[in-house]
Amino acid sequence: MEQYEGKSIFNGIAIGKIWFYEKSEHQVKRVRVDDPEAEIKRYEKSKEIAISQLNQLYEKAVTDVGEANATIFEVHAMMLEDADYNDSVYNIIQTENVNAEYAVATTGDNFSVMFAQMEDEYFKARSADVKDISERVIAALAGADTNSAAMDEPVIVVAEDLAPSETVQMDKSKLLGFVTRLGSSNSHTAILARTMNIPALIGVDIDSSWNGKMAIIDGRKGLIFVEPDEVTLAAYKAEQKKDEDARELLKSLKGLPDETLDGKHIKLYANIGSVADVANVLANDATGIGLFRSEFLYLEKTDYPTEEEQFIAYKTVAQNMAGKKVVIRTMDIGADKQVDYFNMDKEENPAMGYRAIRICLDREDIFKTQLRALYRASAFGNIAIMFPMIISVDEVNRIKKICDDIKSELSGNSIAYGDVELGVMIETPAAVMISDELAKEVDFFSIGTNDLTQYTLAIDRQNAKLDNIYDSHHPAVLKMIEMVVDNGHREGIWVGICGELGADTSLTETFIKMGVDELSVSPSYILPIRKIIRNIKSI
Ligand code: PEP
Ligand code: MG
């Protein structure tokens, strides 16, 4: 057994085989496709293969173990014909323009979580079945497509580094954890790991010879054990079971209000990066989505997402959230989220460069396409829009004018849209200092502590060398948050935190006492934070 240290970016234990990911091999399971219809045909074909296998299994089982025991295969075949299951697969292929394998795996995961949460024992038991049938279809798909050989079982991904675009393309259902040599704990790859609930370490002295070996990630202590001995393995399996039990206990908090002991209600929302994350939001009982990082729709593609593609994605999220608030941030491309087809010049300081709202106000065609999609989708749910990297009132006025133009255009074409709250992200010191003026112009503030820390402390959040002094607890950052809350409340608007600091349970009480109205966090933090909120006072 070998043991290595690293920096943990998400707690938890992962046990499984290592898959050494090398960039030169295009072995990602989540593949972007240009022809979703062709993927649907592949799915249909593989589904038929799976159903015929199941029928054969049924016949064999009737002979071998009797009809009563064989019915499971009949049930599996029927599940594959289920309209909801099939609609979900089609929907994911069409809205995300992805390969059938990914759509089936995601659907399998989502349905399995949904079944697992049902009261009825019969439906609970269907959780494993739905995974089973999904795996069968994926195996059939692999038979037809040799490209999909990688990550065909759940693995711990070990890599030199992972870009957000690579992480987002990995098949989440097969990702047990990841370990990299490079990367910082405030990067978007790290944020994705937290959103996906995946134990992850950075700064580890990795080695390609680990490929295929068994390993354990201990996200609490920041350790990875390669080829663990029996005793260590047994101890960590027991720890893992304890974690599961603790999560089970937290489930008793589902359905309970996010209310302090003295009756202050907090909006406890979730952060997402894709339509597929909504299942996790619902499974963790968040009361809304406080940050949908829409740029991931752009990162997954090889060309600008069309208005229709975006509309379907936003509408799907809004509908799945069934009237609960969905705050969608307009695209925050730039800095570490680079997209080739934007053809951006190389910059000396991309974090302080041409990014986010700066691109949108410069290239209005891109901005208007996104806004039209957002307003159209707002007719199908409770959508709010927020704008990143704001530094001036002038920017906000320009944005509002463009939004008014879009609404007039839609009304002129008799296209419906809903009541949409408009908010700004407070993630630059400039926005903090003029938050009194900004508050007069918008419906809410959402504090992006990741960038606010970076710009306040003048520390590049991507720089692993500075990870130890990138301190979101710095008094300058905390004072800024307080100032923004006060300025927001003076104008009667709500103020939330959607940066990673919002999930820091050591500060939950401080934030509530400051008057923060909303916390938007990775889905897995919802219930632990609910537990705290329900046990503290707001003053
Ligand atoms: C932030 O900066 O805190 C934030 C939420 O936005 P992002 O992490 O996507 O830059
Ligand atoms: Mg930000």
Image (cartoon, grey):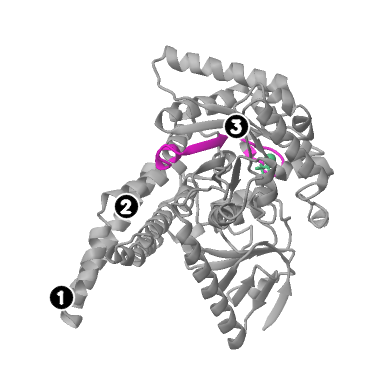
Residue 339, quarter of picture: top right
Amino acid carrying label 1: it is Glu
Q: Where residue 63 appears, x then y in whole percent? A: 16, 80
Q: Nearer the viewer, residue 443 or 81?
A: 443
Displayed quadrant of residue 412:
top left
The earlier-in-sequence mark between 3 and 2 is 2
Q: Nearer the viewer, mark 1 or mark 3?
A: 3
Q: Which mark is residue 386?
A: 3
The residue stretch that appears in magenta: 317-340
In the rendered image, which quarter contains the N terminus? bottom right
Residue at 40% across, 52% down: 100
The quarter of the displayed image where residue 70 is located: bottom left
Residue 183: x, y in percent? 72, 56
Report helix, strand or loop for mark 3.
Answer: strand
Where, quadrant-wise, is the C terminus in this rendering?
top right
Nearest the camera: 453 or 50? 453
Q: Which kind of residue does numbered mark 2 sit on?
A: Tyr
Q: Where on the image, by quarter, is ligand 2?
A: top right
Read off the residue under disc 1: 67
Q: Amino acid at mark 3?
A: Met
Query: Is residue 322 in the magenta section?
Result: yes
